[in-house]
Image (cartoon, helix red, strand yellow):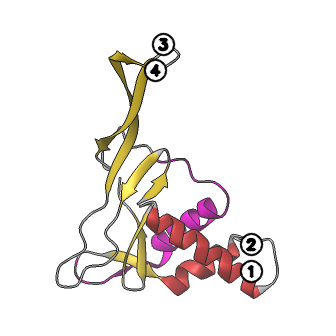
């Protein structure tokens, strides 16, 4: 379970004999108990998790900023310029092509190659977790909205 954008996202991280199921998302919601009062005489409340379809209007992830925005924009440019059709309907770019575009776009202000590599890795990981990007093996593309 992870907190993301005010939501709680439940993910299955280990599957042996089946395909990994889709993540499910919940938003916390406060409920009040009209007939129950605390020692100060105020209505008691609790938190419940309200299911939210990740593909719905109700689920609105935060806007991309910083290194994630640079990496995402670099992926869009790389797909526009260098996309490859893997033959199964997946059209994307190899991670190396995406990484080079991100480096050109200054994903890190440091000249150190290790700093650039780490900045790209963190941004890629976050974009995948937040479902801005999807992959098939080492090929990536922006998620269609």
- The reply to whether dot 3 and dot 4 touch (C-beta < 8 Å) is yes
- SS label for mark 1: helix
Q: Quadrant of residue 108?
A: bottom right
| Camera-nearest label, 1 or 4 | 4
Q: Nearer the N terminus, badge 3 or badge 1?
A: 3
- SS label for mark 4: loop
Residue drawn at point x = 59 percent, y = 68 percent = 71
Indicate which disc residue 108 carries.
2
Q: Nearer the N terminus, badge 3 or badge 2?
A: 3
- The reply to whether dot 3 and dot 2 touch (C-beta < 8 Å) is no
- SS label for mark 3: loop
Give left or right: position of 118 versus 22. Answer: right
- Specify start and end residues of the magenta stretch as a single range: 61-88
Rendered view: 81 above or below 114: above
In the rendering, at what x and y percent does residue 82 appear? Answer: 47, 79
Q: Which residue is mark 4?
A: 38
| Camera-nearest label, 2 or 4 | 4
> Gap between marks 2 and 1, in whole Å?
7 Å
Could you tell me which quadrant the N terminus lies in?
bottom left
Q: Nearer the N terminus, badge 2 or badge 1?
A: 2
- SS label for mark 2: loop
Indicate which disc residue 29 carries.
none
Q: Nearer the viewer, residue 20 or 41?
A: 41
Q: Which residue is mark 1?
A: 115
């Amino acid at each position: 379970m992870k907190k993301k954008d005010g939501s709680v996202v439940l993910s299955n991280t280990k599957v042996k004999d089946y395909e990994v199921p889709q993540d499910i998302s919940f938003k916390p919601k406060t409920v009040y108990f009209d007939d129950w009062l605390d020692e100060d005489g105020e209505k008691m409340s609790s938190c419940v998790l309200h299911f939210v379809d990740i593909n719905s209007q109700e689920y609105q992830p935060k806007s991309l900023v910083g290194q994630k925005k640079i990496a995402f924009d670099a992926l869009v440019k790389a797909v526009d310029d260098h996309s490859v059709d893997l033959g199964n309907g997946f059209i994307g770019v190899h991670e190396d092509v995406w990484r080079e575009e991100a480096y050109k776009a200054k994903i890190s202000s440091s000249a150190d190659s290790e700093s650039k590599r780490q900045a790209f890795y963190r941004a890629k990981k976050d974009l995948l977790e937040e479902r801005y990007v999807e992959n098939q093996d080492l090929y990536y593309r922006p998620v269609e909205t």
